[in-house]
Image (tube, rainbow, N blue to C red):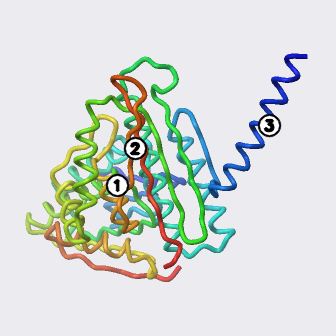
Amino acid sequence: MDNKKDVKGFLEFVYEFYKSMKAHEITLVYEGEITHQITKAFTSLTESNMAKDDEPGTVQRKVFHVMVECLQNISKHADDFTSSDFLFSGRGIFLVSKGENEYSVTTGNAVDNDRIEELTKMLESINRMDKEELKDLYKKQMKEGRLSEKGGAGLGFIDIKRKTGRDLEYHFLPISDDTSFFLLTSTIGREE
Amino acid sequence: METIKIQGTEDTPKVILDKEKEVMEISGRSLPEDVASFYDPILTWLDEYASAPNKKTVFNFKLVYFNTASSKLLLDILMKLEEIHEAGNDVLIRWHYPEDDEDMEEAGEEYADIVDVPFEQVPYSN
């Protein structure tokens, strides 16, 4: 009896969840470990959906770029996280939503609090830059930067801002005394 | 000299490096899981090629997509070609891009700014 009630409650939750996804125009949501296989699967799924919707080539390419950089950010950085909290370690959330005028790509993953300052500084300085400054920074970083052990070139955020032409919106929400949840959302206009 | 031939996949580019036939090209998509290990053999090949290059070296890039990590490795390739050019050899980079892809065109312009090698932009229609 109790079990039946639980199942019903759960199914009602699923319906609420579905409605809420629709309300926020979410077309793809994933929680878990982000691997290269996942990156390939999501980008090709979104790509074929955009092709089906006759989205202009420029928009398709930009969404693809942003998705790859966001997913690779998580796959390369989520396990830098040192806490053993099973809920968060090495995992992340990934969402794509499609509105009338724009696509949004949102990622969330846990970070150690001591990385917040560095991330904020980096994101703020990228947000302040204009097109030319971003271009120069990208070139400089490409020339002088080194590939990290995990193959990151430190270019992802710069590239996202350049491709979308919009600020990187981000937010840190506290998980515990040492850790926070880092959310980042990038929007790509659907107008060419 | 050994020839490198790599079939393209959905996340790695097609690569042909053939000294004898004078064909050098990288085309397709580049977002390998491990960029360094994908591009390593290519850079090693170029090092060897640099010791005894052909009279004229034409290197074709015809990429439709590359991620930021690949962009760094592409610059490494271009810098090797720049060295070959600096050593007094004839080198030409041909950067092919879809005519409606401004970002890919701009990426070519940026590389051309960074390296000092004859650089040709080649638009093509899809």
Front disc: 3 or 1? 3
Q: Name the residue located 31 percent from the left edge and 69 percent from the top edge.
A: B107
* Secondary element at tag 2: helix
Quick check: do tags 3 and 2 share a chain? yes
Q: Give me the C-alpha separation between circle 3 and circle 1.
A: 43 Å
In this view, the residue in front, A92 or B78, is A92
Type of amino acid at the residue the image marks with label 3: Glu
Mark 1 falls on what kind of element?
helix
- Cβ–Cβ below 8 Å for labels 3 and 2? no
Residue A12 marker: 3
Q: Residue at x 55, y 71 (%)?
A: A101
Query: Disc 2 designates what residue?
Result: A73
Q: Is residue B21 visible?
A: no
Quickly name the residue at label 1.
B68
Residue at screen point 37% across, 27% down: A179
Q: Answer whether labels 3 and 1 touch (C-beta < 8 Å).
A: no
What is the residue that sits farthest to the right in this orientation? A1
Q: Is residue A113 left or right of residue A67?
A: left
Above-or-below relation of A21 to A76:
below
Secondary structure at badge 3 equals helix
Residue farthest to the left, as pictured: B87
Q: Chain of mark 1?
A: B
Q: Nearer the viewer, mark 3 or mark 2?
A: 3
Residue B35 at what x, y percent from top left? 36, 45
| Neighbours of disc 2 within 10 Å: few (<14), some (14-19), many (20+) | some
| Residue B60 appears in the rendering | yes
Res B109 → quadrant: bottom left
- The subunit letter for the residue under badge 3 reads A
- A146 to A141, vertically: above or below: above
